[in-house]
Amino acid sequence: MRSDCIFFCPIRVRYNEVDQQGIVYNGHYVIYTDIAFEEFFRSKGYPYKTLVEEHDSEVCHKKSTYEFYSSAYEGDLLEVGMRILKIGNKSMTIGFEIYREGEDELIITCETVYVGYDTKNRASKPISDLMRQLLGA
């Protein structure tokens, strides 16, 4: 539900993201939610690259589940909403909702699990305190 979202990211559907019918190819929704995730941190003053390189605060995408309710089309301006569903020790679940600009009808919902990641050891690690703080946890 829109009111539960803590952040919205606008994304314009481009020609190369649609099929012959002009409908967004489903694989692009992964990109749309990833863009919203990164833009959330940028809006808080921490571009994702800064979180990783200067604050050792990285997560990796473990799993996403999508439910489709409607379609998005070439030229649509989408609003990708983001909300926190759960933050554990080493993982967190973020909910995404995609709407057409100015409309309340859902196009898609997505639940994504991110895992804290240690790039040097290539292993999971706890979600950083900074990331928790930025997410309001």
Image (spheres, rainbow, N blue to C red):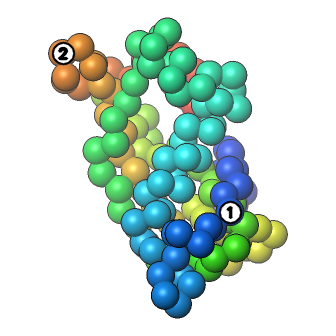
Looking at this view, is 124 or 18 the one in front? Answer: 18
Quadrant position of the N terminus in the picture: bottom right
Horizontal side of 63 relative to 82 (left or right) equals: left
For residue 42, the mark is: none
Q: Write down the residue under mark 1.
A: 12
Residue 28's place in the image compared with 46, above or below, is below
Neighbourhood count class around disc 1 (C-alpha, 10 Å): few under 14, some 14–19, many 20 upward:
some
- In the image, residue 56 lies at what x, y percent? 41, 13
- In the image, residue 110 lies at what x, y percent? 46, 61
Q: Write down the residue under mark 2.
A: 121
Residue 49's place in the image compared with 9, above or below, is above
Q: Quadrant of residue 7?
A: top right
Q: What is the secondary structure assignment of the residue under circle 1?
A: strand
Horizontal side of 119 relative to 65 (left or right) equals: left
- In the image, residue 79 lies at what x, y percent? 69, 60
Whether residue 107 is visible here, answered yes or no, is no
Q: Quadrant of residue 77?
A: bottom right
- The residue type indicated by label 1 comes to Arg
